[in-house]
Image (cartoon, rainbow, N blue to C red):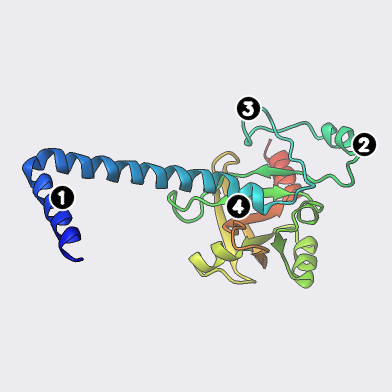
Amino acid sequence: MLAAPFEFMLLVWRNLRRHLLRSLLTVLGVGIALFAFCMIRTIVGGWYAGVEATAKNRMVVRNAVSIIFYLPLAYREAIARTPGVAKVGYGNWFGGIYVDKKNMVAQFAVDDNYLDLCPEYILAPEAKEAWLASRKGILAGEEFAKEFGIKTGDVLQLQGTIFPGLWEFEVKGIFKGRDAITDTRLLFFHWDYLNERNKAEI
């Protein structure tokens, strides 16, 4: 019973050794195919992870060119009048640098309604109240806070790129993700503060 499998494996081994280059190229080809498959699945999974983590009843509208370009605020009223729309919020990509250029972290200047439209971010009610009451308040995501040792009450500075200058904030709360795939390497601060300072510097 054991002779047949043994003879078969011996035959396979002999054939593999007959043309070492062919055998190596075959193994290499299979390895590349497996690597490519894993990479594609990872990219596709990452692409859809954000969509799966967000609310199914939320629609995002942005400039057709890029998220760094604005939409007129007048659009807010037009969108609010659209049948089926219950609430409207808005946000602006900030694009600042935290400590070093390599620290890529998403930062958004948002209105007071923004977090109500994002149930995937969990924030304590008292932290939200403190943030709403502070013009220079900022909310840090849990992942960002852990990475850089940020805690409530800390002063956080961002070096503006799109909006030049040094921007200083006080951390009023740290929000968590509702799901494991929710991205919390984020910062949220008040759009009104961004708008007022820009107007003052014009």
Residue behind mark 4 = 167
Residue in front for this viewpoint, 53 or 97: 53
Residue in front for this viewpoint, 197 or 16: 16
Residue 34, relative to residue 3: is it above or below?
above
Alpha carbon separation for disc pair 4 and 3: 26 Å
Classed neighbour count for the residue bearing mark 3: other residues with Cα under 10 Å, few (<14), some (14–19), many (≥20): few
Tell me which label, 3 or 2, sits earlier in the chain: 3
Alpha carbon separation for disc pair 3 and 1: 58 Å
The three-letter amino acid code for the residue at tag 1 is Val
Alpha carbon separation for disc pair 1 and 2: 69 Å
Outermost residue to the top: 65
Tell me which label, 4 or 3, sits earlier in the chain: 3
Q: Nearer the viewer, mark 3 or mark 2?
A: 2
Classify mark 2: helix, strand or loop: loop
Image-based side of 174 in relation to 8, left or right: right
Residue behind mark 1 = 12
Residue behind mark 3 = 65
Classify mark 1: helix, strand or loop: helix
Residue 167 percent across, percent down from the top left: 60, 52
Residue behind mark 2 = 83
Q: Residue at x 37, y 42 (%)?
A: 36
In the rendered view of the protein, which quadrant contains the N terminus?
A: bottom left
The three-letter amino acid code for the residue at tag 3 is Val
Q: Nearer the viewer, mark 1 or mark 4?
A: 1
Q: Residue at x 69, y 41 (%)?
A: 198
Q: Residue at x 78, y 31 (%)?
A: 72
Instruction: Check whether the beta carbons of the residues at disc 3 and disc 1 lie within 8 A of each other.
Output: no
In the rendered view of the protein, which quadrant contains the C terminus?
A: top right
Mark linked to residue 157: none
Classify mark 3: helix, strand or loop: loop
Image-based side of 20 in relation to 107, left or right: left
